[in-house]
Image (cartoon, rainbow, N blue to C red):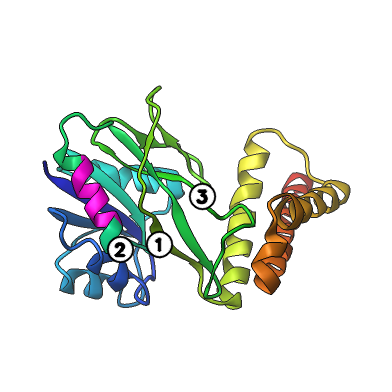
Amino acid sequence: MKLSVVIIARNEAARIERCIASVRWADEVIVLDGVSTDATVERACALGARVESAIDWPGFGPQKNRALALASGEWVLSLDADEWVDDALAGAIRAVIDDPRSATVWRIPRRSRYCGQVMHHSGWWPDHVTRLWRRGSARFSDDLVHERVLCDGTRPATLGAALDHESFAGFEQVIEKMNRYSTDGAAMMDARGLQGSVGRALLHGFWTFVRTYVLRRGFLDGRYGLLLAISNAEGSYYRYLKLMQRQKR
């Protein structure tokens, strides 16, 4: 069975090589580039990936569906540029593809790092993500951010090996990503008819901190568990403030 790996990227020169190198054993690796201004395209091509370009940005869900449409393999593995596959996961994926009786959709536990530290709590582990399926068995939702995989009634099976993920390399990236995601999140909430206000921003920010740090035991991740809970709370807080600002306009 042929496996296609699909990756969306924009200005990921610092991480795209690790991602592609980890799946060079696949039959094809496709990178859908969002008009990068760094060396993303050159580095992806140097590793043998097929690189296609998209001149506009429709959001994460639609962009990932564009990448899926480029795949030719019977199986598809969808990765982000900040993720990579170790030997254990590669072996588990090969076993699924080689087994004609295997499930058609698979989810994978994701081992994420926050500013260099692997997070074992805070809602970040095992953080199952659906990423492997027979082509045509699943697709992504059209959400701008926090896209979901739609399986058309198929219940995903679970792989035993983990996908590695460097969510944030440093605090500059935390702030940049929080700003971008809160803007897109506010746009999505506005489209759904939700209301923003200072009170809602404070309430949701506080609740997000409590959920991350207390209910999801972020305190067991040490000081980085505290920092993650604070940044999550800030993201929720600013999302509702930006929603309020959109609605005032």
Residue 141: where, in percent of width, then height? 45, 36
Q: Quadrant of residue 121?
A: bottom right
Element at label 3: loop
Q: Amino acid at mark 2?
A: Asp
Give left or right: position of 151 versus 39: right
Q: Quadrant of residue 195?
A: top right
Residue 168: where, in percent of width, then height? 53, 69
Mark 2, residue position: 86
Q: Amino acid at mark 1?
A: Asp
Task: Answer yes or no: is residue 191 visible.
Answer: yes
Q: How many angstroms separate mark 2 from mark 1 (CA)?
A: 7 Å
Q: Which residue is at 34% across, 64% downward?
A: 35
Label pair 1/3, CB-CB below 8 angstroms: no
Mark 3, residue position: 127
Q: Which residue is at 65% across, 66% downward?
A: 221
Q: Which residues are magenta?
A: 89-96
Label pair 2/1, CB-CB below 8 angstroms: yes
Which is more toward the observer, 235 or 194?
235
